[in-house]
Amino acid sequence: MNKNHIPSHVNTIHLIAVCGTGMGALACMLKELGYRVTGSDHAVYPPMSTFLQEKGINLFSGFDGKHLEYGPDLVVVGNAVRRDNPEAIKMREMGLYFCSMPQAINRFIADGKKPILITGTHGKTTTASIVAWVLGEAGLDPSFFIGGILTNYKRNYGLGHGEYMVIEGDEYDTAYFDKGPKFLHFDPFVSVLTGVEFDHADIFKDLQQVARAFEQLVANISPENTLVAYDHNDIVDDLVKSATCRIERYGMDARSTWRLGAVTINPPWTVFEVFRKGEIYGTFKTGLVGQHNLNNLLSAIAVSHALEIPIPIVEKAIEQFAGVKRRQEVRGVKRGVTVIDDFAHHPTAVRETIRAVKPFYPSGRLIAVFEPRTNTSMRDVFQSVYPNSFEEADIICIRKPPLLSKILPDERFSSEKLVEDLKTSGMDAYYFPETDAIIEFLITSAENGDVILIMSNGGFDNIHERLLDRL
């Protein structure tokens, strides 16, 4: 009997692969709701392990069927878990009820609420964080479930008592027993689509397959609900043509419902105008940097309007929004050198992040340090695209991908070739086989006024703190 559903009565819940950002947040939310929660992962280490244990969650290190012998009422299976995982095997042998992370969110947290779903290849985390913060400042007490840590809240989840729940809608697959995107599990009251590009090369074979996933998303939005869609993306243009829901476009197009007006950069602030249906809507002030973040803010303003939040409250909330961990996060300044941490890994994100940061540090050089680490960036699908992403950097340091053994030899990305291509284009680029060599290079090369922008979706061997210590 297939027990891929949630029983009516649940007291104890076990999460397989609990130390991921999303699963860890879910574990904490379930614990706060009063359930007894256990979890396991192959790598149980601080800070996530400490954080979960402080929340009263019993953690098991490694995967072992014995962890399920106490007989939990429900097992939540993370999307990193394979069918042959020892605990997944034991779960099926014992006939335990099981579900995916989105199924658990729907049942235990989002049930009875109006989901605000933020989707797209880029900007999901920041946009969802802005929306959650604005709703909170408006007194709407939202629940939220986001893939990054909100600096204002110092966490990536919240159990609110209000009618809305802000969800970062991931296009990645749901679980080994459900290969559809996570975002298809939600029926959004308002949704944002920030754009569609090729990514996740480990599960999508091409851009058309990615587009089909978003096509399903748009088709599932109820006619009475609203989709806020970016106006400078060809795939989004095609998707909205067949949509049956209400559509509001945003960006720079004069025909769009929401449009950016004049932008003034006065570090550390950016002031920008917003137009709605051709008329001035308001003037906003933000500490976020870059065109991409102005677009994220614009979509959040559109969502706020749909929820009838007064403009003065939105203006104040945006000014007070402190950003998201690992999104252009200044980790420290030593010897006049600023070290910034950013999650960028897709070529578009790398380009826009460099372009965003550079105007705020005009007196020095921008040193871009990049670690290709995702399942997509370690493949050669963007080999010819990456050189254009670094055009505005003054010095470029490229690390060898740390997990290349996961990729078939004839599909592997070459950091050496990227550096050769950059040099051919006249750029000052360097290849490094490991992190220690990058640190040694930076401590002798960086000068007063320089900014070192470190981009990776992983920990990058704690390069940020180690570099600051050496500086």
Image (cartoon, rainbow, N blue to C red):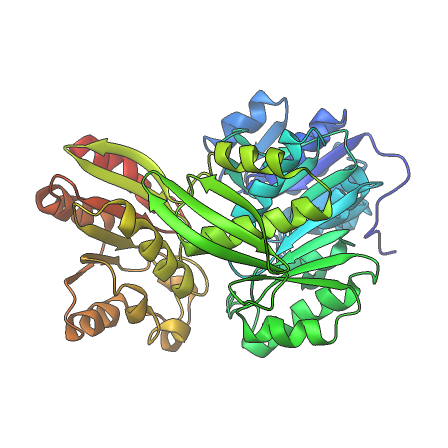
Q: Residue furthest front?
A: 279
Do we see residue 90 in this rendering?
Answer: no
Q: Is residue 146 above or below residue 401?
A: above
* 70 lies left or right of 419: right
- The residue depicted at 27 percent of the width and 63 percent of the height is 390
Q: How many marks?
A: 0
* 192 lies left or right of 267: right
* 100 lies left or right of 63: right
Which residue is nearer to you in this view: 329 or 272?
272
- The residue depicted at 46 percent of the width and 30 percent of the height is 47
State the image coordinates of residue 318 (x, y, percent, origin top left). Answer: 53, 38
Q: Quadrant of residue 378?
A: bottom left
Q: Residue furthest right?
A: 8
- The residue depicted at 74 percent of the width and 57 percent of the height is 226
Q: Is residue 343 above or below residue 178?
A: above
Do we see residue 459 in this rendering?
Answer: yes
Which residue is nearer to you in this view: 213 or 5?
213
Q: Is residue 353 above or below residue 30?
A: below
Which residue is nearer to you in this view: 12 or 396?
396
Pick the quarter of the image with the C terminus. Answer: top left
- The residue depicted at 83 percent of the width and 63 percent of the height is 223
State the image coordinates of residue 421 (x, y, percent, origin top left). Answer: 21, 74
State the image coordinates of residue 123 (x, y, percent, origin top left). Answer: 51, 54
Q: Residue furthest left?
A: 444
State the image coordinates of residue 129 (x, y, percent, origin top left). Answer: 57, 41
Pick the quarter of the image with the N terminus. Answer: bottom right
